[in-house]
Image (spheres, rainbow, N blue to C red):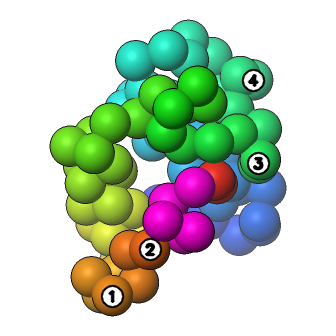
Amino acid sequence: MPALDTVDEIQSRLKQILLEASTDIVSSDGIADETPLAGKGAAIDSVSLLEVVLRIETEFGIILRSEEHTSELQSTL
């Protein structure tokens, strides 16, 4: 797990994870903090969203409890 010191570094890594999961976005420049993760935004389906959650947990050494997986938390970066 690489050390990420700033919010910008964390957001950059999150965007990279989302980019790898997205079917529509070809560059992390296409992911703004307000970009919707589903629908017409990053176009991440429910299976890919689960993969994103697992990657975040693994990469950042955290556990996101299932009750924390609300639509509000899943809506944007």
Q: Secondary structure at mark 1?
A: helix
Q: Nearer the viewer, mark 3 or mark 2?
A: 2
Numbered circle sitting on residue 70: 2
**Mark 1 and mark 2 residues within 8 Å of each other at the beta carbon:** yes
| Mark 4 crowdedness (10 Å alpha carbons): few <14, some 14-19, many ≥20 | few
Gap between marks 3 and 4, in whole Å?
Answer: 10 Å
Label 3 sits on what residue type? Answer: Asp
Gap between marks 1 and 2, in whole Å?
Answer: 7 Å
Gap between marks 3 and 2, in whole Å?
Answer: 18 Å
Gap between marks 4 and 1, in whole Å?
Answer: 31 Å
Quarter occupied by the C terminus: bottom right
Image coords of residue 56 (percent x, y) = 39, 62
Badge 1 is on which residue?
67
Label 2 sits on what residue type? Answer: Thr
| Mark 3 crowdedness (10 Å alpha carbons): few <14, some 14-19, many ≥20 | few
Numbered circle sitting on residue 33: 3
Numbered circle sitting on residue 29: 4
Which residue: 33% across, 87% down?
Answer: 67
Q: Which segment did they paint magenta?
A: 71-75
Q: Nearer the viewer, mark 1 or mark 3?
A: 1
Q: Nearer the viewer, mark 2 or mark 4?
A: 2
Q: Secondary structure at mark 4?
A: helix
Image coords of residue 59 (percent x, y) = 37, 62
Which residue: 35% across, 81% down?
Answer: 64
Quarter occupied by the N terminus: bottom left
Label 1 sits on what residue type? Answer: Glu
Q: Nearer the viewer, mark 4 or mark 1?
A: 1
Q: Nearer the viewer, mark 3 or mark 4?
A: 3
